[in-house]
């Protein structure tokens, strides 16, 4: 009890106290929480014990979960969430599923009704175990107070090792109220969970041999390199062999976007150079990407001539979507270190690299200025320049997300925060809150749409409450733009439920001001430089509403079901 009495103002008395202590023991610095009946004992315990972590109140439990994801993405530490039972717990589900698909470490503590009434449709009861089993890496319901330290320690271990992911801990109210009579062990033993971190060296040697035999290699960098904090090793590997690089959405920033060998993002809205490099390659080395269907397009035509090497910490990913010739199970950093330790083979890919770079030059990403109206791509380029390609860029989901991925030249690892796997509108604002809390000294830029921002706009209250200097850009095209684009191109201009013009959108500037955040509206290009001067000239939060043409599209685009070589809009239309 000695350590406890130093840390807390009174001894540990209840299960709730033990939960708080276990969070402290796991070095939690930030908790994202929202109270309710089933978790009141835990809140009361925090009130009394005054633990040394900050407690962030979002205004919706979905906000808590996305804020925890934003925090996890930029810090590499698990985002920790506390929500009440029933509706509080179900409100976190979207964030849990999102973290699962994008492999973010997260701990979600939910309150539960007392063990005596579980299964009786008690007030605010929801089957959290049933609901979260398919969307979490692991879940627990605590049945006895003495299990608290072990379960919480296990949860942190599982969330942060191997392939990171969300772990849910459901805490019945009588367990958090139960008296603690002795110290309980937090030791755990998980023989069935032993992630492979170190790669098999003979497989690493096979990758090097394949490089020696290749004429047209390409490396695909995925979110795994960001998560493993392996961008330094990745850069060294690429520069050693001078292999061109394409990235997945989650791999953005893992390799500097402004590097000569960067061909850009591959896939549905990828660059011509990236998609053609994969198509024409004879060796594709995938490090930490999961061959998502948005990236591969029609699998029957994906990388048709390539030998495929796939490095992934999750063995279940290898061979899941794309037939793999050289499987390497291991953490991206460990695998890259092992690759670098191998003797360098003499190769030159100069002719191939020139071909890829010529494609990049011949068919760059493009946009046209429409009269004096603001081109979203141009605006994002301007933001990229103003922030020296170094800001933390958070996005929502839609056309603006793809423009951000295409036109913000991200040079730094773990600074692109976007919902890739689940594609969650409403992710952006709370994720920006979490990112700014995790990296208080960084500039955090949110690129959102008029549709997405309205899904979680209440988190402007958290922006104001915690004085977070987030720069929020709402690209207002008065449509649910990505849907609108598909309806235009694929459903013959039949715009069902995707138009938000007239009075259908709120006045975003007034809305920002109502939350106590500065608001600016810009409608023409000539207003942009002064706006950027103001927004990036101080440490205040801003909501900037940018009116953009509804007709502006995301190109190139691979229509669903097509091969990545069948891109539309490669050249200016
Ligand atoms: C929660 C959720 N609901 C629906 C969708 C389907 N969806 C994908 S993009 C999109 C439109 C996004 O509109 P907006 O945020 O205004 O961005 P824009 O595409 O106009 O840039 C919709 C409805 C989604 N991704 N997430």
Image (cartoon, rainbow, N blue to C red):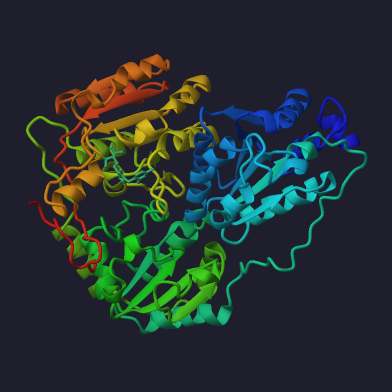
The location of residue 515, given as percent across then percent down, is: 42, 17
**In this orientation, which residue lies closer to the viewer: 15 or 259?**
15
Camera sees residue 532: no
**In this orientation, which residue lies closer to the viewer: 147 or 447?**
147
**In this orientation, which residue lies closer to the viewer: 465 or 284?**
465
Total count of labels: 0
Horizontally, is 105 left or right of 113 in the view? Answer: left
Camera sees residue 461: yes
Q: Residue at x 78, y 27 (%)?
A: 49
Q: Residue at x 25, y 61 (%)?
A: 560
Q: Quadrant of residue 562?
A: bottom left
Horizontally, is 175 left or right of 109 in the view? Answer: right
The location of residue 44, given as percent across then percent down, is: 74, 25
Give above or below for 70 relative to 443: below
Give above or below for 154 relative to 324: above
Q: Quadrant of ligand 1?
A: top left
Give above or below for 535 relative to 303: above
């Amino acid at each position: 009890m000695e350590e406890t009495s130093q840390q807390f103002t009174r001894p540990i008395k209840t299960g709730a106290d033990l939960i708080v202590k276990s969070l402290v023991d796991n070095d939690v610095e930030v908790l994202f929480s929202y109270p309710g009946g089933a978790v009141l004992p835990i809140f009361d315990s925090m009130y009394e014990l005054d633990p040394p972590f900050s407690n962030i109140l979002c205004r919706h439990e979905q906000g808590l979960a996305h804020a925890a994801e934003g925090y996890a993405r930029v810090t590499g530490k698990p985002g920790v969430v506390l929500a009440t039972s029933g509706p509080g717990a179900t409100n976190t589900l979207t964030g849990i599923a999102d973290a699962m698909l994008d492999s973010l470490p997260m701990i979600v503590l939910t309150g539960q009704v007392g063990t005596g009434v579980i299964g009786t449709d008690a007030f605010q009861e929801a089957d959290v175990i049933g609901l979260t089993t398919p969307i979490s890496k692991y879940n627990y319901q605590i049945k006895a107070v003495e299990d608290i330290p072990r379960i919480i320690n296990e949860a942190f271990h599982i969330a942060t090792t191997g392939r990171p992911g969300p772990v849910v801990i459901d805490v019945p109210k009588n367990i958090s109220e139960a008296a603690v009579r002795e110290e309980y062990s937090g030791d755990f033993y998980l023989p069935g969970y032993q992630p492979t971190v170190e790669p098999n060296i003979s497989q690493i040697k096979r990758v090097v041999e394949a490089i020696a035999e290749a004429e047209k290699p390409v490396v695909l960098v995925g979110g795994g390199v960001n998560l493993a904090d392996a961008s330094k090793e990745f850069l060294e590997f690429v520069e050693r062999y001078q292999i061109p690089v394409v990235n997945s959405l989650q791999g953005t920033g893992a390799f500097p976007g402004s590097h000569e060998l960067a061909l850009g993002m591959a896939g549905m809205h990828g660059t011509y150079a990236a998609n053609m490099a994969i198509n024409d390659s004879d060796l594709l080395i995938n490090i930490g990407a999961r061959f998502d269907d948005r990236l591969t397009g029609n699998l029957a035509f994906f990388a048709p001539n390539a030998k495929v090497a796939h490095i992934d910490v999750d063995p279940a990913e290898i061979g899941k979507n794309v037939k793999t010739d050289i499987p390497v199970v291991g953490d991206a950093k460990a695998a890259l270190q092992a690759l670098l330790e191998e003797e360098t083979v003499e190769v030159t890919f100069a002719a191939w690299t020139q071909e890829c770079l010529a494609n990049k030059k011949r068919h760059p990403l493009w946009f046209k200025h429409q009269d004096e109206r603001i081109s979203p791509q141009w605006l994002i380029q301007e933001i990229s320049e103003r922030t020296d390609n170094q800001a933390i860029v958070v996005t929502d989901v839609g056309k603006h997300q793809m423009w951000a991925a295409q036109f913000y030249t991200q040079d730094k690892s773990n600074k692109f925060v976007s919902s890739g796997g689940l594609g969650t509108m409403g992710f952006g604002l709370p994720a920006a809150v979490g990112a700014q809390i995790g990296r208080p000294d960084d500039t955090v830029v949110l690129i959102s749409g008029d549709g997405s921002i309205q899904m979680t706009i209440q988190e402007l209250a958290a922006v104001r409450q915690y004085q977070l200097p987030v720069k929020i850009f709402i690209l207002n095209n008065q449509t649910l733009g990505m849907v609108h684009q598909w309806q235009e191109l694929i459903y013959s201009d039949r715009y069902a439920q995707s138009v938000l013009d007239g009075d259908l959108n709120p006045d975003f500037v007034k809305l920002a001001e109502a939350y106590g955040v500065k608001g600016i509206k810009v409608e023409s290009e000539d207003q942009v430089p002064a706006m950027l001067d103001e927004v990036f000239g101080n440490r205040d939060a801003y909501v900037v509403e940018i009116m953009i043409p509804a007709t502006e599209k995301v190109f190139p685009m691979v229509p669903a079901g097509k091969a990545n070589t069948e891109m539309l809009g490669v050249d200016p239309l």
